[in-house]
Image: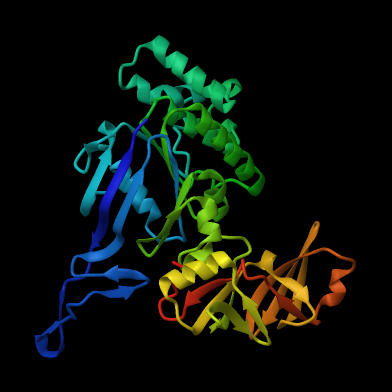
Amino acid sequence: MAEVILKNIKKVYPNSEPKEKKGLFGKKKTEEEKPHRTHHLQITDEGVVAVQEFSLDIKDKEFIVLVGPSGCGKSTTLRMVAGLEEITGGELYIDGNLVNSVEPKDRDIAMVFQSYALYPHMTVYDNMAYSLKIKNVPKDQIDKKVREAAEILDITQYLNRKPKALSGGQRQRVAIGRAIVRDPKVLLMDEPLSNLDAKLRNQMRAEIIKLRNRINTTFIYVTHDQTEAMTLGDRIVVMKDGFIQQIGTPQEVFDHPSNLFVAGFIGTPQMNFFDARLALKDGEYYVEIDDISVKLSEEKQKRLREKGVKEQEVTLGVRPEHMNIADKGIKGRIDVTELMGSSCHLHMTIKEKDAIVIVPREGNIENHMGQEIHLNFSGNVAHVFSKEDNHNLEY
């Protein structure tokens, strides 16, 4: 129901320490003026920069997922949209209105928290109805909205129960129901499934997808779980150390990672990385590693030519499922095998680095432990990253 625009949003937490320190004999000792980094976040004279240069246009009814490791700034960004954190710099627009100074209650947003945050002394019905009651919505409208939301979330049978009588998944449904009864323009969800076990997380992901198709609102969803990001989002925003690393559809980010961090973060198991060389032969690009030379696909050739990429040492990335056992190629030793139903994960040591290769399960895989094998890959699945700044040389 609303477009959300973030323009150069910045969040700085003020330093708790004074800018000047005293040395021996009380003499003032001046700290360096230039910014530096501690624990991967930038420290300036203003303070710790938790989010920096965050710009994103979220379309009406779009489902956006902010994903990244703990401490990357994704929840802080969500809380700034909600109004729970003050915006240090930049502009935030919801439905065309600048809301930097607007109180959370006046932003027409709703938020679902990781901890459910239900009132334990109230029934499910009263928890869901509470925000409407304090707005003096007529009782018949409250009843209609609560029962409609309960039906969508399949919790009608629990309306007279209290939260302590519900499972974790049921409580999270109630928390979502409490949010959607308000018909918010924007629904914010901060790691809502992280407290659930694996089976419930899978079920709730499906429920959220169904919910998204039944209510007309814009979703902004925060998670550290890239599986959730890949399955839920229309677009995903990958973050690290307060900066956006890449924005794109799940398939775009998976197939065309912009840098080494995105390539390693998106995908399970993560991408394998090797030292290699990007070579030019008769105007064609090849990746050389050990005793093999693999010609890159025409699509990759075109992008590298357009960028004018020269021969150089590179970091080669190949996903576990894209490596094949061969007669010659990259040599590695199988350390551990994991049987995963129809496939087998081979944990290997390749060029003194850990790597994982996924192969079809054939016979008694356990007998392969300790064996040395050769691996190869095709040119359409190879990713080449700069040794200097880790960016994908195709982009």
> Which residue sits at x=32%, y=22%?
134
Q: How is the image coloured?
A: rainbow
Most extreme residue toward the right is 363
Image location of residue 202, percent across then percent down: 63, 44
Identify which residue is drawn at 80% across, 56% down: 341
Image-based side of 293 in relation to 27, left or right? right
Position of residue 104 in the picture relative to residue 266 (left or right): left
Instruction: Name the residue: 53% across, 79% down.
Output: 283
The part of the image, by quadrant, that contains residue 328 is: bottom right
Q: Residue furthest bottom?
A: 24
| Residue visible at 51% across and 27% down in the picture | 214
In which quadrant of the rendered view does residue 356 lie?
bottom right
Quick one: quadrant of the N terminus?
top left
Name the one closer to the observer, 299 or 92: 299
Q: Taking the image as drawn, is residue 357 in sight?
A: yes
Question: 199 or 215, which lies in front?
Answer: 215
Position of residue 355 relative to residue 89, above or below, is below
If the image is split into quadrants, where does the C terminus sit?
bottom left
How far across and how far down the image is residue 171, in percent? 54, 35
How many numbered circles does the render carry?
A: 0
x and y percentages locating residue 220 in the rendered image? 41, 43
